[in-house]
Image (cartoon, grey):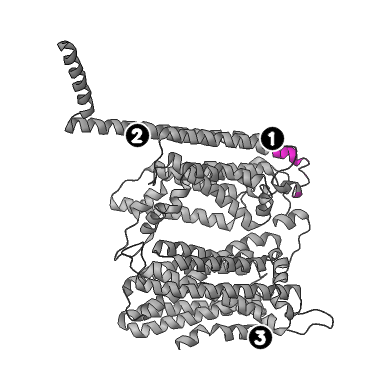
Amino acid sequence: MKRIVWFVGIPTLIAAFALSGNWWREPATGIPDAGPFLYLLTPLAEYLTALLGILTLSYLIGIVLFLPNDDKNVLSPFANKLKRNAKVASLTWTLLGLVAAQSLLINILGVSGSEFFSIDLLITYSWELNTVRALLLTATISVFVFFVLIFAKSVKTIGFLVIVSVVAATFSALTAHAAGISGHALATTSGFLHVLGMSIWVAGVIALYRHLSSVKVVLPKEAIQRFGKLASISLATVILSGVANSLTRIDSLTQLLTTDYGLLVVSKVTLTFTAIFIAHLFRTRWIKNSVSAIRFLLLEVGLLISTLAISSVIANIAFPKASISATTLIEQLTGYPEPDQINWVSAFITFTPDAFTLLIGAVATFLYLIGVRRLSQRGDNWSALRTTSWLVGVVIGVWVTNTEISRYALVSMSAHMTQHMALGMLVPILLVLGAPITLALRSIKSAEFDLLGPREWILITLQSRYSKLIINPLVALTIYSGSIYVVYFSSLMTNLMSSHLGHVLMHIHFVLSGYLFFWLIIGTDFQPRKLAYPFKLLLVLMSMVLHAVFGLILMQSTSLVGGGWFGQVAPKWLANPIADQELAGAIAWSFGELPMLLVFIALGVQWAKSDQQLAARLDRQADNFGDSQREAYNDMLRQLNNKGGKE
């Protein structure tokens, strides 16, 4: 039965395609077509690619989540066995990704199936099509996972590969689309979260089944408890994102029962909730009879694999929502209608929700307050000023990405620069002053039985070679201040701004690069390398100079920077994009004064406290052991005086 479960998805996929009425039909004479085999191979290869990605992830999760690690630099014998299996799975994942990319490309182009082995076809057209490009990126990352696994010797490396594999598994969702101009952002965000939650859930269930079925199972109760927490978060993510994603593809709820697409969605939902019920039965049966309970876990695996198969079919058929074509160039390039002439006050008070940043803000607030609550319940104090700083930073970040200024930032460089300065300077400073790492280390308990929990992974990350590299002051300064020159003075800006994903990545980069830099300057969290205060001051001054020069270049430039993006999307009311770029330069020049004032105040206070602590420590040392340095100096003077007296 165990072997049958792994193949249950293939007949499910074929049946779903046939029953949905989307089976291959012979085209009219003269119209090129790839044929029925490649027509079916495309969703089948996409499904198998997703499944092998999840299988690879399951081996890696099994190592980092369920196996004790008394030595974090050496893998146990069983962990090495899982690593070998992960290598085979990741290589197969790569090959299936390439097959899926080529078959999808042939179907899109409508060329003959004989072109399947044409490398020239893949090289020429694949990068121009989002869905094909996503599969190629998946294959590229999976082969990277394969080669890293060859040399991986520690659980720290495996933990890194878990993150990499999760990213690769979600690439297909990042190309999600939805009918209607305004639905694209929600479709991308919800699709990404849905695939993310589903991948972790299914991979975790497979890893748990493998762990509990092993002959020498270790810590089974702890494994179930640890996965239960992860599964709860993944499950909530799957349900909420699934609802949101489905709503971007239907006009009314009645289409769930009257269309092929809707019936497949209902089938998927039914299988998902059945799997949830089976998971509940597993947990209740485990206490009484572990052997029979494992059978329920295997059944859950089969249901989830069938759910993945139906998901692949859903992704390859048309959805019922009526398509609304873009009518202007701005709509085509940004995904949003052309905004009215900017009113700066209205731009900052008119709410335009963005699901991704709202979710990030809500999670950041929730986790921080949970940490504060844990300390309070334990009787430990936590600075209200730190809490306020964190919450204000989160609110500002959500504010500038969920008001109309975010829409104007797509078409006006002055609005874009205002948002950039808020996300890259003001928000990171406030977040750093909130000391989230210190809060996490104080509020999260250490894992037992040599297992690795969140606290252990935070410490591993802080002490890793990668962390030591990026906290090098010159590297951090280059990432923070140097990257703006790379983005704004090359075509990279146009590439990023032309997609919702690229725009989100810019936001993430602004916040994280700013956080890294200001963490070195005014951060009170644990740091592997402490900088002297004069050097911190020098770094701040250097960053101010680099930002000032950047602003001056924008103000004096006679041509549009960044590949000319803001010239392409300039609305009718913005007659002079060059003047708007000059205003953006002035904002970049002047905006940093207020945030930097906050940095100087924080740096000055910390410097003064450091001097006071040093003086107090020296005084205590003198009181307890005497001032050896001063006494040695006085002895030297007495000896010199005695020599002088003898002469």
Asked if residue 265 can be seen in this view, the reply is no
Mark 3: amino acid: Ala
Viewer-nearest of labels 2 and 3?
2
Image-based side of 403 in relation to 299, left or right? right
Q: Residue at x 31, y 53 (%)?
A: 377
Mark 1: amino acid: Met
Image-based side of 298 in relation to 448, left or right? right
Residue 489: where, in percent of width, then height? 67, 44
Q: Earlier in the sequence, mark 3 or mark 1?
A: 3
- As measured in the structure, the alpha-carbon distance from the residue carrying label 3 to the one carrying label 1 is 61 Å
Q: Residue at x 40, y 52 (%)?
A: 462
Regarding mark 1 in the picture, which secondary structure is present there? helix
Q: Nearer the viewer, residue 591 or 481?
A: 481
Mark 2: amino acid: Ser
Q: Are marks 1 and 2 in contact (CB under 8 Å)?
A: no
- As measured in the structure, the alpha-carbon distance from the residue carrying label 1 to the one carrying label 2 is 41 Å
Regarding mark 3 in the picture, which secondary structure is present there? helix
Q: Which residue is mark 3?
A: 18
Which quadrant of the figure has residue 186?
bottom right
The image's mark for residue 610 is 2
Q: How many marks?
A: 3
Image-based side of 463 in relation to 411, left or right? left
Q: Which residues are magenta?
A: 568-581
The image's mark for residue 555 is 1
Asked if residue 86 can be seen in this view, the reply is yes
Is 188 inside the magenta-drawn segment? Answer: no
Q: Quadrant of the N terminus?
A: bottom left
